């Protein structure tokens, strides 16, 4: 879980566009982030398993 100061710092406009820090909107994690969903891998998995993300289902073969 990211601290409030880290989240606030990442929301500010950076000097250069390559310095943008994308964070999960649920927990604030910056690593393992999926742009398409705006979630980190952990939150994505939790929400997908609970059926909270439409169109996503667990694969099995």
Image: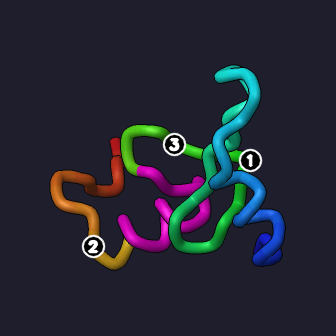
Viewer-closest of 7 and 16: 16
Instruction: Say if mark 3 contacts mark 1, CB within 8 Å.
Output: no
The residue carrying mark 3 is: 34
- Residue at 60% across, 63% down: 42
Residue range corresponding to the magenta coloring: 38-48
Q: Is residue 48 left or right of residue 12?
A: left
The residue carrying mark 2 is: 52
Name the spot of residue 13 as percent of width and height, x first: 65, 41
The residue carrying mark 1 is: 31
Residue 43 inside the magenta-drawn segment:
yes
At label 1, counting other C-alpha atoms closer than 10 Å, the crowd grade (few under 14, some 14-19, many 20 or more) is few
CA gap, disc 3 to disc 2? Answer: 16 Å
CA gap, disc 2 to disc 1? Answer: 22 Å
Asked which quadrant contains residue 5, the reply is bottom right
Asked which quadrant contains residue 29, the reply is bottom right
Q: Is residue 14 left or right of residue 11?
A: right
Can you say whether 59 is above or below 43 in the image?
above
């Amino acid at each position: 879980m990211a601290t409030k100061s880290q989240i606030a710092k990442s929301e500010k406009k950076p000097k250069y566009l390559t310095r943008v820090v994308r964070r999960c909107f649920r927990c604030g994690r910056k690593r393992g982030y999926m742009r398409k969903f705006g979630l980190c891998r952990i939150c994505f998995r939790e929400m997908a398993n609970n059926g909270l993300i439409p169109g996503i289902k667990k694969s099995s073969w």
